[in-house]
Amino acid sequence: SSANLILLGPMTWIAGAINHAALLLRTERLLFFGVFWVNLCLIVRCAGIRLLSARGFLALLLAGTLAPLWDYGFEIRHDNVLLTALLAAWLFARPLAAEARRRLYVVGLLASVAQFIAFKGFAYLVPVVVFAVVAATLEERRSIVHSVAAVAGGVITGTVGCYAAELLA
């Protein structure tokens, strides 16, 4: 798989400001440690638990014991950012509140960005996009044209944004 955007994009900007390799690696590990914690919080939210509660704190502690997260949690890997995109897309595709609506534009945007993080993002995000469109059509009674247009708008925005970020790197 390819990690062009995450390894050659923002990390190149960081590398341009740092003169020593040890400091560069510490900075990038700190960045990915932040991504690790974002992933833990997203796992708890995707489970439908509020973070700022005793139950949310317990769920956060339990999610922190997941071995695969610790295997990659401190490494500089594109898989961590891909997991962030996947969890965020799922959170927007499956609203937790009864009156909340699916954010199809954001789901499409995240699906597009995932392609620039790693090519295998296609395999993970397409099922989430299909689920979101079908659920919005059946449960929220949106027209299929409106749902697909929202996803397409997000995909176009994400693609243009990622190409712009690569040009700036």
Image: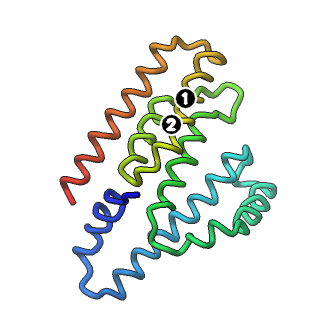
Q: Is residue 91 above or below residue 18?
A: above
Of 120 and 54, the residue lying toward us: 120
- Residue 87 placement (x, y as % from top left): 58, 48
Badge 1, how many Cα within 10 Å: few under 14, some, many 20+? some
Residue at screen point 54% across, 46% down: 88
- Residue 107 placement (x, y as % from top left): 49, 36
- In the rendered image, which quarter contains the N terminus? bottom left
Task: Name the colouring of the figure.
Answer: rainbow
- Residue 71 placement (x, y as % from top left): 60, 72
- Residue at the outermost left position: 167
Residue at screen point 63% across, 60% down: 40
The amino acid sitting under disc 2 is Val
Say whether marks 2 and 1 touch (CB < 8 Å).
yes
How far apart marks 2 and 1 lie (CA) works out to: 6 Å
User: Horizontally, is 58 left or right of 77 in the view?
Assistant: right
Q: Quadrant of residue 29?
A: bottom left
User: Horizontally, is 109 left or right of 88 in the view?
Assistant: left
Residue at screen point 50% across, 74% down: 75
Residue at screen point 50% across, 29% down: 104
Q: Is residue 19 above or below residue 164?
A: below
The amino acid sitting under disc 1 is Val
Q: Is residue 114 above or below residue 61?
A: above
Q: How many marks?
A: 2
Q: Secondary structure at mark 2?
A: helix
- Residue 86 placement (x, y as % from top left): 54, 47
Q: Quadrant of residue 67?
A: bottom right
Q: Is residue 22 above or below residue 94?
A: below
- Which residue, given by chain and number where applicable, does mark 2 sit on? 126
- Numbered circle sitting on residue 130: 1
Q: Secondary structure at mark 1?
A: helix
- In the rendered image, which quarter contains the C terminus? bottom left
